[in-house]
Image (spheres, rainbow, N blue to C red):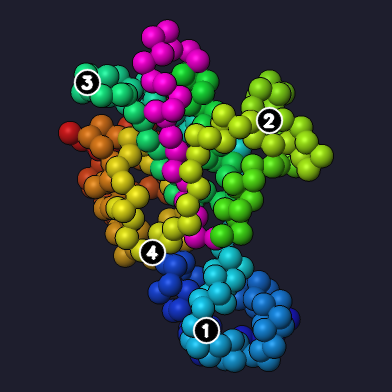
Amino acid sequence: MIGINDVEFDLLRGYLCETCGIAVPPEKRYLFATRLTPLLDSTGCKSFSDFFNLLRTDGSLALRTRLVEAMTTNETSFFRDGHPFEALRRHVLPEVAGRRRRETRYTPLRIRVLCAGCSTGEEAYSVGICFMEWQAEQSDRAFAMNNLSVVATDISRAVLDRARQGVYDPSRLRAQLPPNLVSTYFVPTHQGFRVRPDLQALITFSQHNLAEPLEGLGCFDIILCRNVIIYFSPELKRSILAQFHRMLLPGGALLLGASESLYQLSDSFQQRHVGATILYFKNG
């Protein structure tokens, strides 16, 4: 493992925060050495100073992408924490749908969801399953499946490629989902369990850096950004939350991770507790 000195740490920490918003605290300094030594070896760099200089001269930005992918935490699972998805299905979707029914008379009823920081796709597909389970319960079928959509973004091309494939390890999948959901929404293949095509069709995966402007993604009824902004600086958190507020349609909902909150970051949302889940709604 290649050692990193104070100057190198400050340079790389600043570069990472500037390019993708990830703020590495001093106590996590070891992450640079443990996660980036293989990258330094592959590029022929003998020190982190050499690596930083190479980053600055890499016109293709390919090395920056590899740096971000090495330093990004991609821990995820289907229906992570459980209760937020129950709140989504039982409370948020019906409330948003009811509002859209009242507002829309002459155009198709649509619901758009953004999953920001989607990693390898488990969260986005979990939202899609909630969509399909909820839609199956509706007697009027006012919301056609082709008018329900999820935009899922991540900074890492590698994890997005895996998400688009929609193939998951059978043992891990069975540990995260009950048998009825596995058999209903996944198809066994020689590679693993593949997401059912109609579920996969609900999701659009797109590469996006949350440190860059977000509003080009459009407007949404629901935004999930769970266990993502915890890694960002307070300034970037405020910027992202302000953009989320502008991107949400009136009455739309924001879901954050269990350890995240809007405290001292935004007072633009109405907070509501649904069981163990905290929901943030846009007034209006």
Which of discs 3 and 2 lies nearer the camera? The answer is 3
Question: Going from the N terminus, do you reach mark 4 or mark 2 first?
Answer: 2
Q: Report the residue marked by disc 1.
A: 58
x%, y% of residue 243?
Answer: 28, 53
Give the amino acid at mark 2. Phe
Mark found first going from the N terminus, 4 or 3: 3
Distance of label 4 from label 1 (alpha carbons): 20 Å
**Dot 4 crowding, Cα within 10 Å, few <14, some 14–19, many 20+:** some
Measure how far apart labels 3 and 2 are at the Cα level: 36 Å
Q: Are marks 1 and 3 in contact (CB under 8 Å)?
A: no
Amino acid residing under circle 1: Asp
Query: Which one is earlier in the sequence, the residue at label 1 or at label 3?
Result: 1
Q: Relative to 15, is 72 above or below?
A: above
Q: Which residues are magenta?
A: 136-156
Binning the other alpha carbons within 10 Å of mark 1 as few (below 14), some (14 to 19) or many (20 upward) gives few
Dot 1: element: loop
Q: Residue at x 54, y 70 (%)?
A: 65
Badge 3 amino acid: Tyr
Q: Which mark is residue 6?
A: none
Rendered-image quadrant of the N terminus: bottom right
